[in-house]
Amino acid sequence: MSVEVDGDIIRLAHGPATAAVSKLGATLISFAVDGNEHLYVSDAANVATTSERPVRGGMPVVFPAFGKSYLESLKGVQQHGFARNVGWEFVIAEVLDNFTVARFKLTHNTCGTHKAYREWSAFYGRPIEFELSTVFELHPQAVVVKTELCNLNIPQLEFQFLYHTYFRVPSVDDMYITGLQGNKYLDRLAVKYHVDTDPMTKIGEQTDRLYRLQSAQPVDILSGNYNVRLTASPNLQDLVVWNPWQQGAAAIGDMEPKTSYRHFCCVEFGAVDGVRLPLGQKWFVLLVLIRPLVKVGLDE
Ligand code: TA6
């Protein structure tokens, strides 16, 4: 069990599990059990707070806008908001009896000069005051991520939120996602709605799907020794499955090597329908990434 602060990176260890979080966006950049790394990070990713570019990989926090938002209140805000582009305050990391924990915080004081923050504030006609905090609890087989938003001065603060998680897999050809069957999704490339009828969803081409989940149930990524189970709080009802494939990866400057698309898939729990948070209230979400003790599904 240990905690190590290495410049902008906080490293945690607890039993067979290790994790690392960059202060840049409070981005989880590593989660491994028994040395098996579950997150993909591009070779060209910059993980230091000196970069204004978000980490390409790991689990950046998308807030307050998803994509180029369709919501009126977020129209001026850049793609995926600004929380992933700025350095968060590292509050504390400590070893506790059952887990090792690291806490990060982002407030209007820390990101007040960011152009996208000012554009978001412009909609309300005054600087938004908020506190966003994320806690990473590393357990022997899991990482539990808890995020809380507090609205300090706007009657109804509207936002979107997403954990943009890049899962590393040996080969996307041998990867399946279960738990999506029966759910409606928007194919964001063809701009068409479908229902996923597949008990084991497979990605074999450029994919950008936005699911609306009917119930809060776990989603499994099956990939031999790299199986992961995702469990999210019921208020994270949306789920994005994204892989840029060859043509998309070629156009992403900081995705290296360009063949990386074969070794990751983004499976992203979020709330992208627009959440309205009344003044003085808190919004809380949770995501658990578990390495199952019993292997389900495929062998490597
Ligand atoms: O979450 C999927 C997505 O919104 C895709 O549409 C895709 O472009 C991607 O995220 C990556 O976005 P980024 O701004 O990180 O290049």
Image: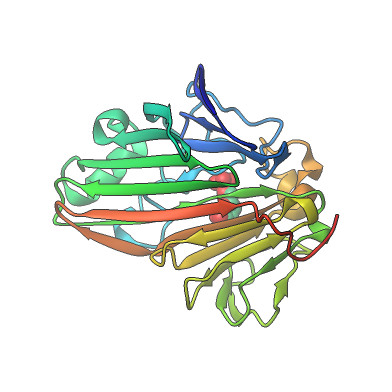
Count the labels in the image. Answer: 0
Q: Is residue 98 left or right of residue 274?
A: right
Chosen colour scheme = rainbow
Position of residue 52 relative to residue 157, above or below, is above
- For this orientation, the residue located farthest to the top is 7
Position of residue 37 relative to residue 213, above or below, is above
Tell me which residue sits at (77%, 57%) in the image.
223
Query: Is residue 66 something one can see in this rendering?
Result: no
Tell me which residue sits at (75%, 50%) in the image.
169
Tell me which residue sits at (73%, 47%) in the image.
249
Query: Is residue 30 something one can see in this rendering?
Result: yes
Tell me which residue sits at (14%, 46%) in the image.
153
Q: Position of residue 138 (x, y in %)?
A: 51, 40
Position of residue 130 relative to residue 12, above or below, is below
Q: Position of residue 279 (x, y in %)?
A: 14, 54
Q: Is residue 30 left or right of residue 26?
A: right
Q: Is residue 42 left or right of residue 123?
A: right
Q: Position of residue 145 (x, y in %)?
A: 45, 47
- For this orientation, the residue located farthest to the right is 300
In this view, the residue in front, 22 or 295, is: 295
Q: Position of residue 268 (x, y in %)?
A: 55, 57
Instruction: Work out which quarter of the rendered image holds the C terminus and state it.
Output: bottom right
Position of residue 230 relative to residue 139, above or below, is below
Instruction: Work out which quarter of the rendered image holds the N terminus and state it.
Output: top right
